């Protein structure tokens, strides 16, 4: 992040350079001091303002440092041993959570899950959970009821795929975190190819929503669902769910990332800080402007 004083110095130097190079026919030589000062202030503020959000990674898991086999017990993950890591497939070629690997599944087959605790206390605005997925619908057994989200089924929010009802789709489910039975939506597609999913939790507007990218221009955003601050503050884990109940299998997952986006107020704070710093620094620039004006007068340029 640039030092506000450095920003002032840069713009002041540029302004002095322009005055120094101004000839007798230059428009700058005839600019009134008041207008010149106003333009200088605008330049300073513009140089100190940015609206580009910067994501701060809170949690990241690509499974590359772990070993093939049960995920639980590795890298801070806990839960059922049926969820396994393998070397991957053509769509997700590196080590992945393999929902199609049933070698560790015990009878009776069931829905199973693992979780990793996370600390979201540093996030002040938006929290974004993103992951890659590969769910199958064109081959048997099909993927079903498997997904990734915050906290799990009891009080969380998640994306999960489905094939058993309504055709191949992804379901965004915020019913648990919102307490509203209507806070869910199904999005058709996203099977037999890479699906990139996001869950967004907004601590400022108190809402959650999802984004999806199924490739080939199939992108979108779900409705925004209202939640309470206490429900958001209760989020403390990333959850992976697999449904191994016959006649279905799970889904492949990789590249799980939880990131925080700063408040817009803090994004704009640099310009405010720049203005404060320049208010002091500009007083010296005003004196310099008067000095240059005298020199220009002496040279009969004004």
Image (cartoon, rainbow, N blue to C red):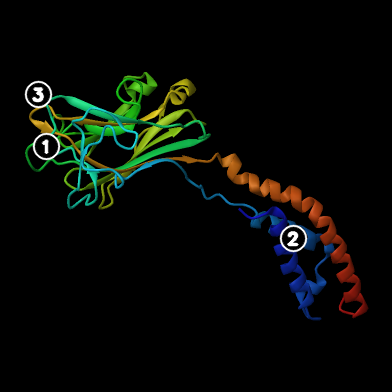
Between circles 3 and 2, the one closer to the viewer is: 3
Against 145, residue 287 (above or below) is below
Please identify the quarter of the rendering in which residue 248 is found: top left
Q: How many marks?
A: 3
Q: Nearer the viewer, residue 28 or 70?
A: 70
The dot on residue 40 is: 2
Q: CA distance from mark 1 to mark 3?
A: 19 Å
Counting from the top left corner in percent of width and height, residue 1 is at 60, 53
Where is residue 160? Give x, y as percent.
Answer: 25, 33
Nearer the observer, 272 or 119: 119
Q: Which mark is residue 107?
A: 3
Q: Nearer the viewer, residue 43 or 128?
A: 128
SS category of the residue bearing label 3? loop
Q: Residues within 10 Å of mark 2 (few under 14, many from 20)?
A: some
Which one is closest to the eye, mark 1 or mark 3? 3
Marks 3,2: beta carbons within 8 A: no
Between the C-alphas of marks 1 and 2, the distance is 64 Å
* Real-space CA distance between mark 3 and mark 2, rounded to the nearest whole angstrom: 74 Å
| Residue 169 quadrant | top left
Judged by depth in the image, the label closer to the viewer, 1 or 2, is: 1
Secondary structure beneath dot 2 equals: helix
């Amino acid at each position: 992040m640039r030092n506000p004083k450095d920003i002032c110095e840069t713009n002041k130097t540029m302004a002095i350079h322009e005055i120094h190079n101004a000839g007798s026919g230059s428009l700058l030589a005839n600019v009134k001091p008041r207008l010149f000062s106003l333009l200088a202030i605008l330049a300073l503020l513009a140089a100190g303002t940015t609206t580009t959000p910067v994501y701060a990674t809170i949690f990241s898991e690509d499974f590359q440092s772990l070993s093939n086999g049960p995920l639980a017990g590795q890298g801070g993950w806990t839960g059922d041993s049926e969820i396994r890591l393998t070397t991957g497939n053509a769509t997700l070629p590196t080590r992945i959570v393999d929902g199609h690997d049933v070698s560790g599944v015990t009878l009776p087959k069931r829905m199973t899950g693992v979780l990793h605790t996370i600390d979201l206390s540093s996030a002040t605005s938006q929290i974004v959970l993103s992951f890659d997925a590969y769910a199958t619908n064109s081959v048997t057994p099909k993927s079903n009821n498997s997904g990734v989200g915050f906290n799990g089924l009891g009080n969380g929010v998640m994306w999960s795929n489905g094939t058993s009802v309504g055709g191949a789709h992804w379901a965004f489910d915020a019913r648990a975190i919102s307490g509203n039975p209507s806070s869910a939506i199904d999005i058709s597609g996203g099977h037999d190819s890479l699906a990139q999913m996001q869950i967004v939790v907004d601590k400022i507007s108190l809402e959650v929503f999802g984004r999806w990218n199924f490739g080939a221009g199939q992108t979108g955003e779900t409705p925004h669902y209202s939640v309470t601050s206490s429900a958001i503050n209760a989020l403390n884990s990333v959850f992976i769910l697999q449904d191994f109940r016959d006649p279905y299998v799970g889904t492949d997952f990789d590249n799980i990332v939880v990131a925080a986006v700063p408040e817009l107020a803090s994004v704009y704070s640099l310009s405010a800080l720049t203005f404060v710093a320049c208010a002091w620094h500009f007083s010296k620039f005003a004196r310099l402007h008067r000095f240059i004006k005298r020199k220009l007068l002496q040279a009969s340029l004004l």
